[in-house]
Image (cartoon, coloured by chain):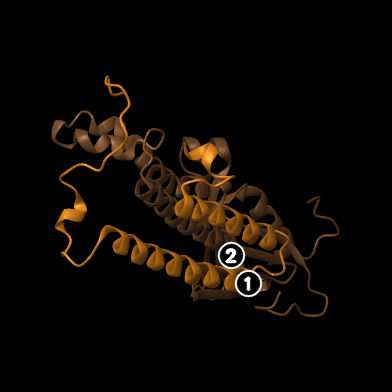
Chain colours: A brown, B orange
Amino acid sequence: MKEFELEPGEHVVKQVRKHWFLFVAELLPYAILAVIPFALPKFLVFAPPLAPYAAFFDYQLSTNALAHALLGVWLLMIWTVAWGAFTRYFLNAWVLTNKRITTIKQRRFFYREVSSLLLPRVQDVTTNVAGILSSLLGIGDIKVQSAGAEIEFMMRGIPRPEQMRDIILKYVSGEPKTTNI
Amino acid sequence: MLDQPLQPFSFPSINFFSYLPGDLSAGLFTTWLLYAVFAFWAIYTLIAIYHWLKYSHASWIAFPAIAMHLFVSFALMSYTLSSNAPFATPYLS
């Protein structure tokens, strides 16, 4: 880890990211935008004034290089921005070591927050799984409060929050011999 | 589907390019649009790769993710420029 140096005797216990389902849900708008050019000819025929343009967007029939170029540009833009979303998803992480919890927030490019909370200062760990889908997929939040009360760590949308809470509490009460992870 | 026999496609008589200034042709517009999009792509990709290499903590996912992005992007660029990309065409037509 370059953003925080591990102390002697410190090791990473677990690193978690937002649940994959939330990431897929985040990609849904991009998928819809990508499908729009292919759906246009089917919708335009229902609007008589615009019907002549339907052939322009019918990429199977159209030999117009401009139509294909605009489609390629549209898909390239969407792909690039969606890949940026994946980059941000991957660079957001919570890292639990045997001595502290570190949260890394990549809000956008060139906007990164890294903060740590020492485990001896942890006073309360709360999990919250709300909703049918979250219960079925095991998605939830964890709130970690410190003794000082001014620091509160919130991990939103992580997989199996109960398991993460148990691991945190094991390390808060003293490093366990095995974690069965 | 159209119920008429297939005809060579011609751009509708009332089209977007008829509203462009007289000295700005469709070809010139398309050229500059492509320049702008490719410039945006290049800057965005460089910034994202910088973040991957600096902050992914040497994760094994970094290089496959970058490689996949470049592969898909070049396939789409090829399709954009030639209307015929070996990897993209089967999925786009």
**Is the residue A67 above or below the residue B49 in the image?**
above
Location of residue A139 in the rendering, given as x and y in whole percent from the top left corner: 55, 45
Looking at the image, is A24 positioned above or below residue A86? above
Q: Which residue is painted at 19% across and 67% down in the image?
A: B23
Tell me, for residue B55, which label it has, or none: 1
Can you say which quadrant of the picture contains the N terminus of chain A? Answer: bottom right
Q: For this view, does A48 lie left or right of residue A97?
A: left
Q: Is residue A168 visible?
A: no
Q: Is the residue marked by circle 1 packed among few (<14), some (14-19), or many (20+) residues within 10 Å? A: many
* A133 relative position to A165: left or right: left
Q: Is residue A8 above or below residue B87?
A: below
Q: Is residue A32 visible?
A: yes
**Within-10-Å neighbours for mark 2: few <14, some 14–19, many 20+:** many
Do residues under tags 2 and 1 come within 8 Å of each other at their CB atoms?
Answer: yes
In screen coordinates, is A117 left or right of A41? right
Q: Give SS at disc 2.
A: helix
Q: Amino acid at mark 1?
A: Tyr
Amino acid type at circle 2 is Leu
- Residue A38 or A112: which is nearer the viewer? A38
Callout 1: chain: B
Residue A89 numbered mark, or none: none
Quarter of the image where one finds residue A93: bottom right
Residue on which the image places disc 2: A91
**Secondary structure under the numbered disc 1 in the rendered image:** helix
The answer to whether A1 appears left or right of A88 in the picture is right
Name the residue: 52% across, 68% down: A106
Q: Return the x and y of residue B66 as percentages of the image width and height.
A: 63, 61
